[in-house]
Amino acid sequence: MLRLRAAEAADVPEIFAMIGELADYEQLRNRMVGSSDDLCRHLFGEPRFAAAMLALWADAVAGYALYFYTYSTFLCRPGLYVEDLYVRPAHRGRGIGRQLLQGLEDQARARGCGRLEWAVLDWNRGAIDFYRHFGAHPIEGWTLFRKELT
């Protein structure tokens, strides 16, 4: 009943809607300033900056993962960074999030990646526990930095 597939340009409105749902859940809607046109250009234009995988449950879009490749100079191998992992509330508890992560891990291994990485909000205990059960662990001793470019 669950099917994973690469996103296509026609999926952008649905992906953009789920990004909004995720922003609402994370209480960060005010930071969502991009447009669906931006998303389409970056997922499907040249150069491509990111990609997305969709989870379909009985042909309904149940969730998505948005990701891009990084590079580790210490490993001298690429990595896969998961920017978003989201499963719609009506579809949670069916193993969809785990299957999305497993699909990304399989893809990363096939491309010779040395690691799969992502960030999680400190208060999101459910997600932290889920990621630990997946076999991931927090990176102790590192602090994420960001500089906004406007």
Image (spheres, helix red, strand yellow):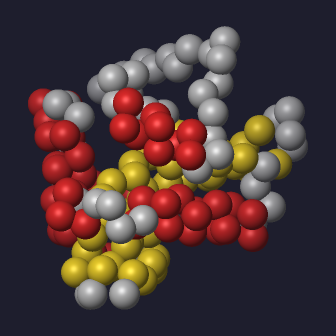
Q: Quadrant of residue 87?
A: bottom left
Relative height, residue 112 to residue 120 (above, below)? below
Relative height, residue 1 to residue 66 (above, below)? below
Residue 40 locus on image (x, y percent): 30, 64
Residue at the image position 63 percent from the left and 41 percent from the top:
136
Residue at the image position 78 percent from the left and 49 percent from the top:
114
Number of residue marks: 0
Residue 90 in sight here = yes
Question: In which quadrant will I find the C terminus?
Answer: top left
Residue 24 locus on image (x, y percent): 14, 40
Relative height, residue 93 to residue 72 (above, below)? below
Residue 32 in sight here = no
In the displayed structure image, the side of residue 119 where residue 78 appears, left or right: right
Relative height, residue 58 to residue 125 (above, below)? below
Q: Quadrant of residue 139?
A: top right
In the displayed structure image, the side of residue 141 where residue 110 appears, left or right: right
Front-most of residues 46 and 51: 51
Front-most of residues 132 and 78: 132
In the displayed structure image, the side of residue 79 where residue 45 appears, left or right: left
Residue 1 locus on image (x, y percent): 37, 87
Q: Quadrant of residue 2?
A: bottom left
In the displayed structure image, the side of residue 51 where residue 112 appears, left or right: right
Residue 134 locus on image (x, y percent): 58, 50
Residue at the image position 82 percent from the left and 35 percent from the top:
73
Residue at the image position 23 percent from the left and 46 percent from the top:
22
